[in-house]
Amino acid sequence: MKKILVAIFLVGIMLLVPISNAYRTSNNESIQITEDDSELPRFVITDDEYSESIDFIEENFDEDEKPQAYNLLSRVVNTDENESELEIDLINLTYELLSIYIPIPEEELNNINSEQDLDDLLNIYWGVTPSGFIENLFGELLIKIVEFIKDRLGWIYRLFNDGLSLFYNGTTLVVDVIKPISFQIAVLFVFVVNKLLSAPMVIAEAINELFQQHYTEFDEILNTFANEFASDISALIDEIIGFVTHPQIVAYLNELQKFVNWLGEEPWTDKIHVIGSVKTLLLGQPWPGLIINCKGEDLITDSNGEFDFYVDPSPDGGSFPKNQYYGMHNCQISVSNENKLKKQSIELLSYCFSGGEISWSFRIIQKKTKDERLTLFELFENFLKNIQSLFPNFFRIIRDIYINPVYN
């Protein structure tokens, strides 16, 4: 259930990814990229990722549900044999996800007069029953398409992930604990968790402005959301906390307040985590002592050929949109040796939100040392010995099958 709710928000973030054209491959470094400002953003997945969705359907859906599951997958992923890509249909994916759970209209919340009214709304809008949330495998299938980018979402993923955890836990608290104690407090709590679920609509509005290249409006919407959201939630907390002593309720409200306080700390300015490794192409051995650069920060690979450091996400010309903390930052990683550039991560796939993580593994050709040449010679020598032992057997088998019978 929680994963389904996270998917509702993550799909919106996918739409912020810069325009790309990425061909099917399981090796990120071989993807060909073009950019065209005249097109809307596109997003593709690899064959392996598509296969994961197929496997999920085969393993989790009943036979009578599989046609519907495959139909859903075909609506959100373009599998046209004439195309070289598996492109996500962002419009359909957004529609499918947002249709699973939506905020309860406030006018309906204001008209709750009985526990039955409350139960009906929770069931209709969120699929909540007296025994908990209804499992939705179709929602689980949809998240397979978006979950691979969560590390790069940074503060936005934490905003939605923590917010949705609070939504899930708050709704469960209403059903299991609060409603049996106080109907009035239960209704107030539904207002709280409903506010947590209102973010998809805000994100959709912001993304629409981003598509229209109205970056000022994009910033304004997100700023207004952060300020008003914190104000509304804090007001609801103050209204409830004054007359409750139940430890589970108090603990939940404290967690909710921590979430609001974190949002007020401007997490979109958090540093970006850059990690990875460099190994030799042929033998896959660690390559220490190389210079790693990302957004003006340098680091030397350690004895294991690994690097692990943080970079400042200050907006620059490589940000998308430019000069905006809310957008993504180009965290392209460069590997150098003796003042010579050896390799770089792909620019498009190196974009990351503040507070996110970029992970990249490099395999680079290295000039062989004496020890490495000896190792390669030994490998080649063993290969020749294997060939030598194979062919006598091969000719013996041929002789026994085709020649000996003739003379026997």
Image (tube, grey):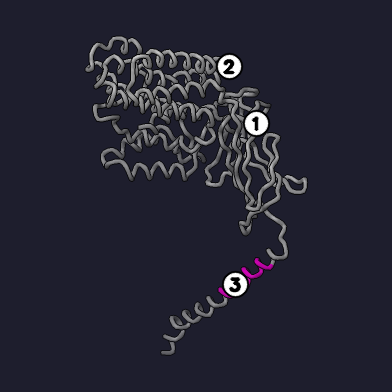
State the image coordinates of residue 404 (x, y, percent, origin top left): 44, 86
Between 267 and 389, the one lying in front of the other is: 267
Q: Residue 382 bears which disc, if any?
A: 3
Mark 1 or 2 closer to N-term? 2
Q: Over which residues does the magenta segment extend?
A: 374-386
Mark 2 or 3 closer to N-term? 2
Question: Across the whole image, how many numbered discs are drawn on residues?
Answer: 3
Callout 1 secondary element = loop
Q: Is residue 406 magenta?
A: no
State the image coordinates of residue 242 (x, y, percent, origin top left): 37, 14
- Label 2, label 3: how far apart the Cα atoms are: 64 Å
Q: Mark 3 near mark 1, Cβ–Cβ under 8 Å?
A: no
The residue that mark 1 highlights is: 312
- Label 3, label 1: how far apart the Cα atoms are: 50 Å
* Furthest residue toward right: 339
Q: Residue 214 bears which disc, if any?
A: 2
Instruction: Please tell me which residue is depicted at 36% across the width and 28% down the height of the picture.
Output: 169
- Label 1, label 2: how far apart the Cα atoms are: 25 Å
Between 306 and 281, the one lying in front of the other is: 306
Callout 3 secondary element = helix
Instruction: Please tell me which residue is depicted at 55% across the width and 22% down the height of the picture.
Output: 265
